[in-house]
Amino acid sequence: MKKTERLANEEHHPQSLLVNDPPLRALCVFEAIARLGGVTLAAQELAISPSAVSHQLKVLEEYLQISLTVRQGRRLILSLQGREYYRSIRAAFNVLRQATEHLAEQAQTRQVTISLIPLFGMGWFIPRLPSFMQANPQTEINVVYANHRNYLSDASDMSIRFGNGQWVGYQSEKLISGRMVPVCSLAFLRIHGYIDSPEQLLQMPLLHDEERISWNAWFIQQNVKRSPRRNGPLFEDGLLTLAGVQAGLGCALMREPLIMPYLDSGELVKIFDLPLDDDRDYYLCVRQDSEMTQDGKLLQLWLRKAAKELLLYGTKIHLATDGNGFPLNI
């Protein structure tokens, strides 16, 4: 269609004007001319000839049906409409450049994002993380919270999840056991005295998780007929429960692998080495529809090795006894 025919058609159908997006190549050329102040500099930046720059400028002007530039002697400068148009599109080009630079920086940093439950991070992952960072200084680890109520929203490269290992759309492998043991703080023992039987534990304030079934199951396993009193606070997650135990609020059943630093330091003690296994463990999970990066694979291998070391070497005994096996002098 000739230009005169197109203009005549647009007079009858004005909504047809600029139906399509502007020619992007021509738009990029105009932005370079306006930003750099001339055709020659734009040609150098874009690695094309000055005549090619002029041609693309003409393409955009014909598309917009306005003159974006005017001659001032031997120089080509922006017209009033050209300056207004550049002010309108400049922000969009800045956003594109920033997004591109951000993506390039991410590629250079080789970042791996892992989501996990807070107590798992504090009690197991972070204390071991220095060894990975020392062996892999080029890999940046981004640690985020795992939303245990909505795992479907997790966009991390990998995640540590607690449960039975069954999550739709994910490949999972068991990492560490979720076995629970009864614990309290050393300060709590000093106040309440040594606890020498599961029956005596019934008289102590017991901290509960949101399901409130763990203590019942543990006492049944120990052949204790009476149900525990619900005389302790209720906590939503393990991190809050840990804070309650540290504050001396009572005794709690806690996932032993996650509280090893606190047992090692003596801040917490196992009341009895009588674990409860509720068939829920900690799993390393990756999406089935995504391909793991090389740095992600390195982190996976390291996690497996760390978990295997815990399994091979076991855990120390942290019962409330002295070095000879007698109760602590509390």
Image (spheres, rainbow, N blue to C red):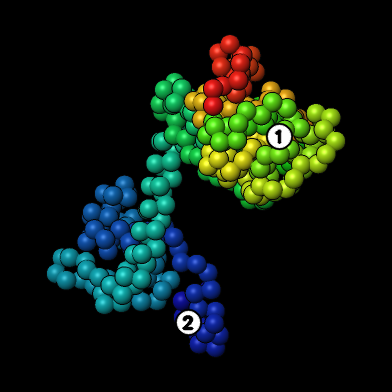
Q: Is residue 60 left or right of residue 286?
A: left
Relative to 316, 100 lies left or right:
left
Three-letter code, disc 2: Leu
Q: Residues within 10 Å of mark 2 (few under 14, many from 20)?
A: some
Q: Nearer the viewer, residue 67 or 317?
A: 317
Residue at x 16% of width, y 71% of height: 72
Say left or right for 268 vs 76. Answer: right
The residue pinned by badge 1 equals 201
Which element is circle 2 on?
helix
Number of the label disc, if any, that sits on residue 110 = none
Residue 283 visible to the viewer:
no
Q: Quadrant of residue 325?
A: top right
Residue drawn at x 66%, y 42% is 205
- Between the C-alphas of marks 2 and 1, the distance is 91 Å
223 lies above or below 45 = above
**Three-letter amino acid code of the residue under disc 1:** Leu
Neighbor class of circle 1 (other Cα within 10 Å; few <14, some 14-19, many 20+) is some
16, 296: nearer the viewer: 296
Quadrant including the C terminus: top right
Q: Pick whichever, 51 or 308, lies toward us.
A: 308
Compared to residue 134, the image places residue 158 above or below, namely below
* Residue 142 visible to an observer of this rendering: yes
First of labels 2, 1 by sequence position: 2
Q: Position of residue 55 (x, y in %)?
A: 35, 61
Q: Picture coordinates of residue 177 (x, y %)?
A: 69, 27
Against 35, is 224 above or below? Answer: above
Instruction: Tell me the residue at 46%/66% (across/down).
Output: 22
Q: Which residue is mark 2?
A: 7
Which residue is most to the top?
324
Element assignment for label 1:
helix
Residue 258 rendering spot, x and y as whole percentages:
59, 31
